[in-house]
Amino acid sequence: MESNSTASSRFALSAEEYRQFHQQGYFGPFDVYEPEEMRSLWKRERLRLMDRSNAAYQDDEASSGNTNISNYDRHLDSSFLADHICRPEIVERVSGVLGRDVLCWRTEFFPKYPGDEGTDWHQADTFANASGTPQIVWSGDEAVHFGGTLTVWTAFTEANEDTGCLQFIPGSHETMVYDETKKMHYDPNRINATTKEGVRRGFFGYDYRDLQVDPDFVPDESKAVSMVMRPGQAIMFWSTLMHASLPHNGITDQMRMGFAARYVPTSVKVYPDTDEIIEYGGRVSLEKFGSVLVSGQNDYPFNRMATETLTGHPFPAR
């Protein structure tokens, strides 16, 4: 499939970049902010985000804030994050792959503190991995060519091999080696308690190996590439790409913070036939949830949509 980039796009992938993205499953890192700009923004916004009074999912729903659900969708109450997911440095590259009409359906913070374990090698297609229920469903012929979501992971702080940067296995996005219809058992006692292939890795209280199609499968870490990123840089990748993160080795006392925005075409069904998210030991209502149109137009009636944040800040028109 050819790139949908246009000549007027400042940040669109070139034909060669698009070819490499299709081959490797990722593109980047690329600059979204200057490092000092990001450091200043994060110093300010980190304090603001401590106020969760307008967050879409409240702590009392998400098991007192002890699950990953508490880190979901803060773009729905933060004007900074609302603007971030619509930045042309991101959206023009995403729409060059997905087409003109694009939604951001989820965002997530991924903090890693000194001593935290790395994240398991994993792939995500329908995002049914934790609940057993598909959270995104591609339709018709699109499902033959695509699957998963296009994730743009932005480093809000330094992300390197000491602080626990992302790792990818290039080209692994074409074949799913996990069955997301299987069930994983959530056990918070697993967190920071497991070593796999000599590396401390886990999956937020789950063991991703429970989903392997082949129980004996072991990711080939000799092919892994570490994604070292400065504050303000981002990387775009298919969620079906085999990816993981290294542990934070504690050499520095600085946390690593990544922010992932997830994009799909408007034709993809988001949270179909459900009114809540159930995973990571928590359960939250989707009453305040809405996908955000970041490019083009939405001609489909089936998805909940948000046109402004829960505090009244409009999402930038596209």
Image (spheres, grey):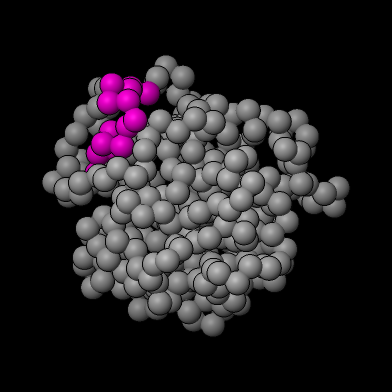
Q: How far across and down, in percent of the image, does residue 162 sit?
A: 37, 33
| Residue depicted at x 49% and y 67% | 75
Residue 247 visible in the picture:
no
Farthest residue toward the front? 140
Q: Where, by quadrant of the figure, is residue 116 drawn?
A: top left
Q: Is residue 215 magenta?
A: yes
Q: Is residue 128 left or right of residue 199?
A: right
Q: Is residue 263 magenta?
A: no
Farthest residue toward the bottom? 312
Q: Is residue 271 left or right of residue 11?
A: left
Decide which of 257, 1 is in the foreground and name it: 1
Residue 288 visible in the picture:
yes
Farthest residue toward the right? 7
Q: Where, by quadrant of the figure, is residue 88 drawn?
A: bottom right
60 vs 147: above or below: below
Farthest residue toward the left? 189
Point out the image quarter for the N terminus.
Answer: top right
| Residue depicted at x 64% and y 46% | 141
Q: Magenta stretch: dominant SS?
A: loop
Decide which of 75, 241 is in the foreground and name it: 241
Q: How far across and down, in percent of the image, does residue 163 sit?
A: 37, 38
Q: Is residue 107 left or right of residue 82?
A: left
Decide which of 53, 37 is in the foreground and name it: 53
Q: How far across and down, in percent of the image, does residue 318 sit?
A: 72, 67
Q: Is residue 13 left or right of residue 109?
A: right
The stretch of residues the image draws in magenta is: 206-219
134 vs 115: above or below: below
Q: Where, by quadrant of the figure, is residue 133 drawn?
A: bottom left
Q: Looking at the image, how many numbered discs can be counted on the residues? A: 0
